[in-house]
């Protein structure tokens, strides 16, 4: 509680208000200022443990293939990499200056030289692949440009890296991948390994970086041998990789620790027919148990929002978009597809209560599958918060045990005089495993709700390929960037950081170990979502300049915000770390 009490004191010292169409935070206190101790008690944190997981909204049996099943149906893109959909908890944003002169969106920092490269389309393949399979992903490992290497050669040939600081985790993995691919390809090109017995470019690295490349190389070698069913060699390589990896080491050691553990379990399942396919965390906890835990405020996730600008930025921009859409509404109805603890709604509630003309009612409808009592607790916490800010409030739980029967017009209890918004915070990716459920949900929203706007935040990643190797490579680079962001923001011994990485561990294992319907964790990029939403007559709407400008201001308040990158994909905002996309925010209206 100490951390959250201190954080609450800081966060509630400023009162939220709306200036024009911009959600901002002033310093003046009024009679409506929230009591610090009461606010802290509303969202008393619970221990997530070291092996918590994401919500799994698998509702019914049955499966059919759609364009959302496999990324190859849409092709790759620069934004086809994953992040953590597990972190959609909201947190009260720190006070920032309101935007007085909206500006066009610019990057909050230089894009890393390790910018992502378009991945070639592949024909879906089974787990088995040849010993040269990684070579098909060689473009993913081409990281060292002329600017980085200092080469004047038009082909960028150089054996030495000229750098001013330690390589990022993504860069280390790309060097290891380039080295590994060249071992098999053996061509005299920019991957030339003739300059150093350890491989391409290692002569320009420090001893610590060479060690990092070595453990990454062992990881890549292991996955190759597992895919080629060379189990004895895979076992030896995994053993060496795990011996060099560390749960509390640097980011590359931690990435190799979790990916090595997942590969070890996949190896055990492939080499033994007695191992059942199941979805559980590394300590045996079932997804349903983890789902229940995440319905209460979690100290690890709160710490993540406090220290890292990534999720705070995307969450705040999403709330800003909702606020602008309902700026003059007298009765506001928000349908939240994944309310969980409800903490993200407090940002919205403060802003609504501080409007010059507060709404007559703020109603929240929360979709739920199980754990009604937990959702009722969320409703009670939000009701207490609403009392503190003097906001008329109503909370309704819509239990959805059957998508076909429970999502009808009457179930949403819509009033003709209310402004309706749908908010999907890192949720719809959980329905990818059951496309007919996703279709039914979107059909219900289109036919029965017809919201004025639907705001969607998602993991900007492509972890839905049928190809095990493609999933492995995409996830590897995604989590290299994510773990790098954790390392820049939290101490390596932090219990909260280890718990966050435990959440990542469950997702990594689910995506890498399981196949078919057992692989319940999936993600696709905004380009795929755009094509999907078009089927329902949805039109992507432009995010406001004030929303984008405020996102940049938030990044500037973090000491590590300079490593975050912002760019637009169509009308969608993409938030990344050193050039690797992690989250997306988009807003949609029905035509």
Image: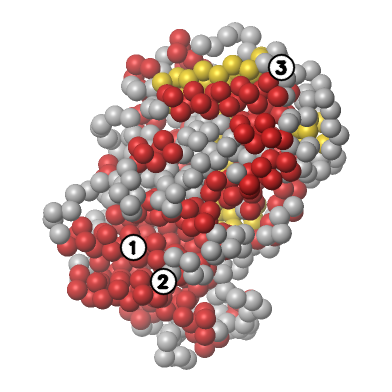
Residue to which mark 3 is pinned: 359
Query: Which corner quadrant holds the C terminus?
Result: top right
Sequence order check: which comes first, mark 1 or mark 3?
A: 1
Residue to which mark 1 is pinned: 261
Q: Residue furthest left?
A: 273
- The residues tagged by marks 1 and 3 sit, at their Cα atoms, a distance apart of 51 Å
Sequence order check: which comes first, mark 3 or mark 2?
A: 2
User: Is residue 399 visible in the rendered structure shown here?
Assistant: yes
**Label 2 Cα crowd, 10 Å radius (few <14 / some 14-19 / many 20+):** many
User: Of 455 and 510, which appears nearest the observer?
Assistant: 510
**Label 1 Cα crowd, 10 Å radius (few <14 / some 14-19 / many 20+):** many
Quarter of the image for residue 487 reads bottom right
The disc placed on residue 245 is 2
Rendered position, 366 above or below 259: above
- The residue drawn where x is 20% and y is 70% is 231
Quarter of the image for residue 61 reads top left
Q: Nearer the viewer, mark 1 or mark 3?
A: 1
- The residue drawn where x is 78% and y is 44% is 96
Q: Position of residue 87 (x, y in %)?
A: 52, 44
Q: Position of residue 507 (x, y in %)?
A: 39, 50
Element under label 2? loop
């Amino acid at each position: 509680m100490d951390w959250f009490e201190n954080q609450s004191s800081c966060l509630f010292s400023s009162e939220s208000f709306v200036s024009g169409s911009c959600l901002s935070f002033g310093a003046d206190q009024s009679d409506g200022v929230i009591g610090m101790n009461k606010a802290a008690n509303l969202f008393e944190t619970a221990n997530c443990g070291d092996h918590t997981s994401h919500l799994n909204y698998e509702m019914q049996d049955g499966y059919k293939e759609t364009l959302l099943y496999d990324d190859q149906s849409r092709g790759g893109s620069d934004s086809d990499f994953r992040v953590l959909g597990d972190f959609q908890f909201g947190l009260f944003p720190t006070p920032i200056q309101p935007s007085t002169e909206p500006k066009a969106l610019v990057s909050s920092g230089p894009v890393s030289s390790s910018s992502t490269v378009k991945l070639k389309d592949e024909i879906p393949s089974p787990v088995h692949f040849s010993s040269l399979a990684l070579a098909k992903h060689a473009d993913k490992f081409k990281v060292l440009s002329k600017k980085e290497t200092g080469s004047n050669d038009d082909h960028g040939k150089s054996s030495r890296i000229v750098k001013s600081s330690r390589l990022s985790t993504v860069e280390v993995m790309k060097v290891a991948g380039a080295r590994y691919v060249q071992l098999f390809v053996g061509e005299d090109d920019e991957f030339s390994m003739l300059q150093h017995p350890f491989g391409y470019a290692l002569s320009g690295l420090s001893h610590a970086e060479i060690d990092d490349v070595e453990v990454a190389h062992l990881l890549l070698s292991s996955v190759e041998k597992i895919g080629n069913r060379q189990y004895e060699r895979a076992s030896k390589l995994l053993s060496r990789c795990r011996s060099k990896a560390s749960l509390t080491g640097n980011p590359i050691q931690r990435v190799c620790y979790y990916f090595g553990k997942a590969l070890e379990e996949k190896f055990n399942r492939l080499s033994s027919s007695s191992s059942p396919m199941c979805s559980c965390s590394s300590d045996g906890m079932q997804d349903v148990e983890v789902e229940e835990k995440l319905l209460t405020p979690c100290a690890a996730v709160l710490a993540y929002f406090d220290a890292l600008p990534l999720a705070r930025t995307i969450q705040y921009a999403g709330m800003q978009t909702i606020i602008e859409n309902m700026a003059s509404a007298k009765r506001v109805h928000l349908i939240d597809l994944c309310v969980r603890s409800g903490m993200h709604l407090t940002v919205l509630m403060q802003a609504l209560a501080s409007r010059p003309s507060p709404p007559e009612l703020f109603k929240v409808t929360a979709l739920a599958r199980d754990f009604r009592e937990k959702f009722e607790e969320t409703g009670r916490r939000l009701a207490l918060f609403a009392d503190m800010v003097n906001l008329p409030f109503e909370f309704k739980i819509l239990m959805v045990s059957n998508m076909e029967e429970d999502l009808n017009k009457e179930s949403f209890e819509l009033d003709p005089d209310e402004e309706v918004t749908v908010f999907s915070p890192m949720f719809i990716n959980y329905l990818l495993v059951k496309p007919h459920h996703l279709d039914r949900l979107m059909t219900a929203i289109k036919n029965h709700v017809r919201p004025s706007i639907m705001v969607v935040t998602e993991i900007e990643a492509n972890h839905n390929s049928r190809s095990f190797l493609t999933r492995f490579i995409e996830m590897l680079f995604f989590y290299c960037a994510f773990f790098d962001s954790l390392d820049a923001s939290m101490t390596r011994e932090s219990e909260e950081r280890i718990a966050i990485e435990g959440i990542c561990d469950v997702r990594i294992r689910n995506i890498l170990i399981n196949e078919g319907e057992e692989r319940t964790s999936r993600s696709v990029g905004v380009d795929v979502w755009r094509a999907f939403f078009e089927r329902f007559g949805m039109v992507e709407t432009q995010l406001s300049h004030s929303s984008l400008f405020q996102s940049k201001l938030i990044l500037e308040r973090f000491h590590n915000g300079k490593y975050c990158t912002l760019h637009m994909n169509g009308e969608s905002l993409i938030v990344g770390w050193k050039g690797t996309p992690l989250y997306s925010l988009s807003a949609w209206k029905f035509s």
